[in-house]
Amino acid sequence: MTGWKVGFLCAAPPLTRALAAAHQFLTFTTPPNLQAGVAWGLEHHRGWFDDMPASLQRSRDRLTAGLRAAGYVVLESQGTYFLNVDLAASGIALDDVMFCERCVTDFGVAAIPVSAFFAENAVTTVVRLCFAKSDATLDAAVERLAAARK
């Protein structure tokens, strides 16, 4: 149920910045009403849940193949809907934050700098991409990320 963030915030800018930083690490729990929704879905739409792993694997493999063909070094991925790309091994000299900022502003692709998940001794050469997307979105991302390497 990732992505189902519930709530809002209205505060002075300094407080907003602090709460936004904390928010990143607090939204990985599921509210009870959403858990009830998942239980209902499992009971009434079981086929979708049964087919989902194969669909995600197909999307993972599609994005992995496209990125590798574009010259990116993609780390192996299992049990998630994210791929990690090793920038240094891909010949990209930017750190993860700079690369992700450039991807969004110049190429319209959102990536997550892995360094955001570290309190200290951060890995700064790996970025994370979500592959839980349509084929058209994945293909467009590969095309844009291929252009980003140039």
Image (cartoon, rainbow, N blue to C red):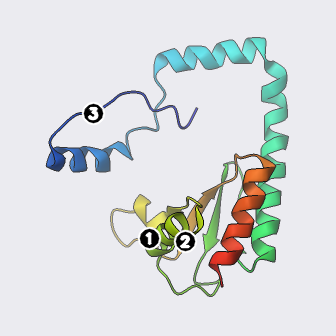
| Mark 1 or mark 2: whose residue is earlier in sequence | 1
> Where residue 45 appears, x then y in whole percent?
78, 17
Comparing 130 with 30, the one in front is 130
**Vertically, is 119 above or below 42?**
below
Callout 1, which amino acid?
Answer: Val
Q: Secondary structure at mark 1?
A: helix
In the rendered image, the vertical position of residue 9 relative to residue 116, given as above or below: above
User: Mark 3 belongs to which amino acid?
Assistant: Leu
Q: Distance between the Cα atoms at labels 1 and 3? A: 25 Å
Q: Earlier in the sequence, mark 1 or mark 3?
A: 3
Circle 1 sits on which residue? 97
Mark 2 touches mark 3? (CB < 8 Å): no
* In the rendered image, the vertical position of residue 38 relative to residue 65, given as above or below: above
Which of the 4 quarters of the picture holds residue 87? bottom right
Tell me the quarter of the picture where residue 91 sits.
Answer: bottom right
Label 2: element kind? strand
The disc label shown at residue 9, or none: 3
Describe the element under mark 3 as helix, strand or loop.
loop
Residues packed near mark 2 inside 10 Å, few (<14), some (14 to 19) or many (20 plus): many
- Residue at 51%, 31% (x, y): give it: 4
Task: Give the residue displayed 41% in from the left and 61% down from the top.
Answer: 116
The residue that mark 2 highlights is 126
